[in-house]
Image (cartoon, helix red, strand yellow):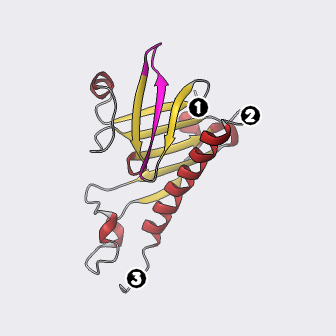
Amino acid sequence: MSGTINYGNLMHRAMRGLIQEVLKDINAHGLPGAHHFFITFDTTHPDARLADWLKERYPTEMTVVMQHWYDNLEVGDVGFGITLNFGDAPENLYVPYDAIQTFVDPSVEFGLRFETQESDQDEDTEDDEDAVPQDKPHAEVVSLDSFRK
């Protein structure tokens, strides 16, 4: 065991697990009430899948809205797949949980922001005694004001 507990990395994984659980519930029961999500993700993530025209339009990050119309929601252990409508053009997306930068449900003023530094290391190195804790990703609650018009 290493000399420190990496709380930042543990919170990061727990908060992504929370997103997975929410999406599993939505998959089973649908979106309740006024709930809806703004999900911003890194389009350059090697496991993210989206149409070429979307990659060209959003070369680094993209925010999708999961609200009135979505289809084919598939929630997996490392990411989720979904079909969303872009100007009357349904497109399939696959978003790894590690690619998510923000997850916001404005109906209940809930939001998460995942920030990473350029020198992020893989989570597999969490037990490595040479890993520097401040180089790890951390998560924080995000202000909803940035999503209001």
Disc 1 crowd, CA 10 A, few/some/many (<14, 14-19, 20+): few
Residue count near mark 2 (Cα–Cα under 10 Å), binned few <14, some 14–19, many ≥20: few
Residue type for callout 1? Arg
Q: Residues within 10 Å of mark 3 (few under 14, many from 20)?
A: few
C-alpha separation, residue under disc 1 versus residue under disc 2: 19 Å
Which numbered disc, 1 or 2, marks the residue that appears first in the sequence?
2
Is residue 66 placed above or below 6 in the rendered structure? above
Residue type beneath disc 2: Gly
Which marked residue is nearer to the observer: mark 2 or mark 3? Answer: 2
What residue span does the magenta drawing correspond to? 78-90
Image quarter (top left, top right, bottom left or bottom right) of the C terminus: top right
Q: Looking at the image, is mark 3 or mark 1 nearer the viewer?
A: 3
59 left or right, relative to 75: left
The residue identified by callout 3 is 4
Q: Identify the residue under disc 2.
A: 33
Per the image, is 85 magenta?
yes
Residue shown at 53%/50% (left/top)? 20
Image location of residue 89, percent across then percent down: 43, 15
**Considering depth in this image, is 79 or 143 the residue closer to the camera?**
79
SS class, disc 3: loop
Q: Where is residue 65 in the image (x, y as percent from the top left)?
A: 53, 30
Residue type at mark 3 is Thr
Determine which of the numbered discs, if any, sits on residue 148 in the image: 1
**Mark linked to residue 119:** none
